[in-house]
Amino acid sequence: MTAHTRPGRPGPGTAGPSGPATAVVVGGGLAGTAAALALADAGVRVTLLETRPRLGGLAFSFRRPSPAGELTVDNGQHVFLRCCTAYRWFLDRIGGTRLAPLQGALDVPVLDAGAPRRPRLARIRRNGLPVPLHLAASLAGYRHLSPAERARAGRAALALRGLDPLDPALDDTDFAGWLRRQGQSARAVEALWDLVGVATLNATARQASLGLAAMVFRTGLLSEPGAADIGWAHAPLGELHHTRAGAALADAGVRTELRTRVTALTRAADGRWQVATERGATGPGQLTADAVVLAVPQREAHDLLPPGALEDPGRLLRIGTAPILNLHVVYDRKVLRRPFFVAIGSPVQWVFDRTRSSGLDRLPGGAGAQYLAVSQSAAHDDIDRPVGELRRRYLPELARLLPAARGATVTDFFVTRERAATFAPTPGVGRLRPHAATQEPGLHLAGAWTATGWPATMEGAVRSGLTAADGVLVGLGLGRRHRNPPPAAGGRLAQEAV
Ligand SMILES: Cc1cc2nc3c(=O)[nH]c(=O)nc-3n(C[C@H](O)[C@H](O)[C@H](O)COP(=O)(O)OP(=O)(O)OC[C@H]3O[C@@H](n4cnc5c(N)ncnc54)[C@H](O)[C@@H]3O)c2cc1C
């Protein structure tokens, strides 16, 4: 089935020698979609092939019946930061910026469930002062740490700022060991470093490479005052990554083929690429193109890469994966007044109010009800637990954290499990991540797992797509179209993309 096809456009590979250059993008996640848009914007005739019936890859929505009516559910809560300039370019490019606004200024409510009498609230906030003073006042008043721990955390932040995330030695070092050497207590790791790190790296400090951790903390917290302001979709992810992205692709002239699995890539004698496909309805097919962007997960990329494309393709198989679990809880009443909070001293991590974005408030049975998504990163211990066990483990915790939940009735509880949500950012992973260009002319890799310098994020995915598109354009003699990597912070990227 073909979706999002602009009528009247010829397919790729059909142009004569003087026609426009052609490219096939394999994979309709954020990396592939970004690459397809960038190539089409540069005048390349693009076909995007996606095996699933939807775009968006790992960041998508689905419909689910609930006692109140049909909910629109995200497979997992996604957030981004102001410093995610490539993802913000993407939002802008698909007309989705208004649906995924940023906080005016970083403000994270942190509830300590382990406080002696009742959960205690502290906030991580920034002010308008220059870096690093923008966080100094907040850290000085951060009551989940002792004054000595706060002072040591400030010193560690300054030391982190002095590190070069691209230094290969940092990739081999684990973040927890480095934090220990900086005098960080177990409490400081839990209440500060892991609070940010687990959500952004999908790993605890013990599981994370210092290089990636330094990248996250330096870029997010220590580059520009507003860099860590948080944004998230106030609409279902599918509205952005499937519906709006699909419309933008069609407008740009990209032919998008859903339910189409690529089974082989081969280079023909004339140097062009032959892309073999398998389609549910019509069976095997083949496309020919001047260039290919392979924007699929690392295992699939390994299986599709032709021999010789990478020096050591086995490295792709050594890139591990890490799970994210989301618990979806519908209460018969409002139990949380804030849009989100994060917990410490509890197995609960980040909790978001999804009432409006899921459409619950507009359902006949949804009046007054509230839908919370509990997002559990690095969820190795929980990912395979049965739903009943998760319910018994997490509902009492939510009641402990949210007094209003104690008298409320849970009308629906379900989970979404993403076992390979991200690549595992373990020490040494940097050596395994390939660059976009392969040794085969015209064949480029994209995906959050490629060598973007970023952890597995929407930002990394879009960056990788833009990098791959740039490589294709240079190879086709069309020059670069995007300033990539985009600037680390600020909102100017949309204007800078020419
Ligand atoms: C639950 C969860 C929560 C997350 N939270 C955040 C967050 O808060 N912030 C953040 O920035 N990131 C978050 N992430 C990570 C982010 O979603 C991913 O890094 C990003 O979406 C990856 O995009 P991608 O295009 O690189 O890969 P993918 O999304 O994996 O896309 C690859 C695509 O290729 C397709 N494909 C595979 N094989 C073939 C084939 N043979 N032929 C055709 N198509 C094929 C797949 O179907 C898929 O659509 C989260 C991820 C999950 C799962």
Image: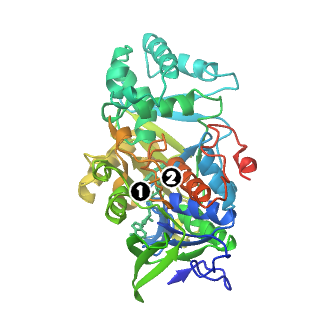
Q: Secondary structure at mark 2?
A: helix
Mark 1, Cα crowd under 10 Å, few <14 / some 14-19 / many 20+, is: many
Residue 416, percent from left and from top: 37, 60
Q: On residue 329, which mark appears?
A: 1
Q: Quarter containing ligand 1?
A: bottom left
Front label number (2 vs 1): 2
Whether label 2 touches label 1, CB < 8 Å = no
Mark 2, Cα crowd under 10 Å, few <14 / some 14-19 / many 20+, is: many
Residue 230, percent from left and from top: 59, 41
Residue drawn 64% across the image and 45% down it: 102
Count the marks: how many? 2
Mark with earlier residue (2, 1): 1
Residue drawn 68% across the image and 54% down it: 481
In front of the other: 104 or 163: 163
In front of the other: 195 or 468: 468
Indicate the colouring scheme: rainbow
Q: Inspect this view and state whether residue 287 appears.
A: yes
Q: Is label 2's Cβ within 8 Å of ligand 1?
A: yes
In front of the other: 226 or 248: 248
Looking at the image, residue 352 lies above or below residue 197: below
Q: On residue 461, which mark appears?
A: 2
Residue 337 occupies which quadrant of the picture? top right
Distance from Cα at disc 2 to Cα at disc 1: 29 Å
